[in-house]
Image (cartoon, rainbow, N blue to C red):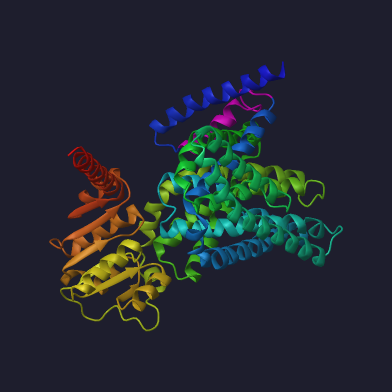
Amino acid sequence: MPEITYLKDLVIVLGAAIVVVTALRRAGVPSIAGFILTGALVGPTALALVDDTHHVEVLAEIGIALLLFGIGLELSLDRLRRFWKAVLLGGGIQVTLTVACTALVAKAFGLAPGSAIFLGCVVAISSTAVVLRGLSTRGELEAPHGRLAVGILVFQDLCVVPMILAVPILAGGSGTVQEILLAAGTALIILAAVLAAARYLVPPLLAIVARTRQRDIFVLAVFLVCFGTAWALSLAGISLALGAFLAGLIVAGSEFRHQAMSDLIPAREIFASLFFVSVGMLLDVSDVLAHLTSTVGLLGMILVGKFVIIWGTAMILRMPVRVGVLSAATLCQIGEFSFVLLNNASGFELLDATLSHNLLTAIILSMLLTPVAIAFGPRLALSASRIPWLNRVLDAEPPGVDAREPHSGHVVVAGYGLTGKEVCRAIQDRGMASIAVDVNADNVRAAKAAGNRAVLGDITQPEVLESLGCRHARLVVISINDTRAAELAVRGIRKIAPRLPIIARAWYDMDKDALQAAGATKVVTAENTTSVAIVDASLAALHATKTATHDSAS
């Protein structure tokens, strides 16, 4: 019975995943890497516990859609709009440089121009699923390197459609540039129409469903929005995963965002895990060993090349050393949409069989190494940030800003987001001096427009701390969205100002101990603050209810 086979494969995959991921987590290996290794282990080329991978792949398609829908819920269109420069400039520069550099290297190895450009397109795409899952798990989606990574990923995913349309031309077959532009324009029109319809139809739909107070109907409505939007956008040639991501962005802008997230999380985690398992099943362990030298060489060239290009992109955008290194470590792999490109080009013989197979293996291995690279990134960033000439190049102040003017008795505010803005305003209202520092040039301009002194710089760098006058400051407030960077900043401040009061912000209570150990005088966590506010509001509501009841009784 096919139903029994389907269920058997699912039980084997889930059971093996629990064992492998649990064992590897004890060794500090990220769960995503564990799921990929599980797929390689139970797949047809290893233990062959699952012979037909089609069953798992179908569930994996659902998983990738739910995963990116959930990531979209965490961001929202309004938040994504705030870093449009990372999308257009960061993504545009990275994709262009990667395609061009890869094509030049490939042509030097003897590939035809069309094949070389196609290889560049394949290499340019990073893994949206792996990267966003890793950043979300570490709470770094809103960190500076997280915003740059997300912006580049969005641009990459949007490039998949024109890349697919360009395959016939690169292969020397049918199709013209005009036809590609026409198809791309049509896709953009459909994209705009679907997003506009979803933005104005989804909130009223969810409001109607929510008024029924039936959770099961609301869950069905959320799934309808997710898969309905993804399916509609797929008609324009946009990938199912990107369509689901955009659907999540739409729902995130409504008042039902948190309820949708709570209802989605259990199903999302199960199906997303199956996606990573399905990626591992594509890995032929015996074939990897047979072509180990060529595969490892290709993998090394891809990882190192993309790392340098993405770091170079961050340099062009005047990002600090830390942001550039973390972004490069996060995005240096090749992603799942490259499978789509290779599949669409299979009939055009753009790449020979050996190169295509080695490339497929390198893609899977690069995705397997990504969680490790993300975890190792902060150490690499710390080492790179100690290189003096890099800091002089990347952390240079923009024209018109003199960070070396004398400071004394002032307050240093690191991070000019919502929290930093309120702190600067409160200090300004009390007639005290403050200076804001941020790695985002837009935030620096906003701070200066509000009448604050502000500089562009990385608070983790000793040179920036000296230029801000931390030795003679009255207080330092750290409100950046990168907990690891906040910890480095606290340690750096403590070296030059052992007795200076430092107030640091963190998202989670589990980060509090690390910041206090680094030397923070007080750590305020969003998690604890929210719970306190809810308790206070609850007690106030109960008191009001009790008073009203007492008055009515009397």
- Magenta segment: does it hold 320? no
Q: Quadrant of residue 414?
A: bottom left
Residue 2 appears left or right of 511: right
Q: Nearer the viewer, residue 136 or 519?
A: 136
Q: Nearer the viewer, residue 54 or 389?
A: 54
- Which quarter of the figure is the N terminus placed in? top right
Residue for point 16% across, 72% down: 472
* Residue 465 seen in render: yes
- Magenta segment: does it hold 38? yes
Q: Position of residue 251 (x, y in %)?
A: 53, 50
Q: Position of residue 322 (x, y in %)?
A: 39, 60
Residue for point 16% across, 64% down: 497
* Residue at the extreme bottom of the image, as rendered: 400
- Which quarter of the figure is the C terminus placed in? top left
Residue stretch rendered in magenta on the structure: 31-51
Q: Position of residue 339 (x, y in %)?
A: 68, 45
* Residue at the extreme front of the image, as rendered: 554
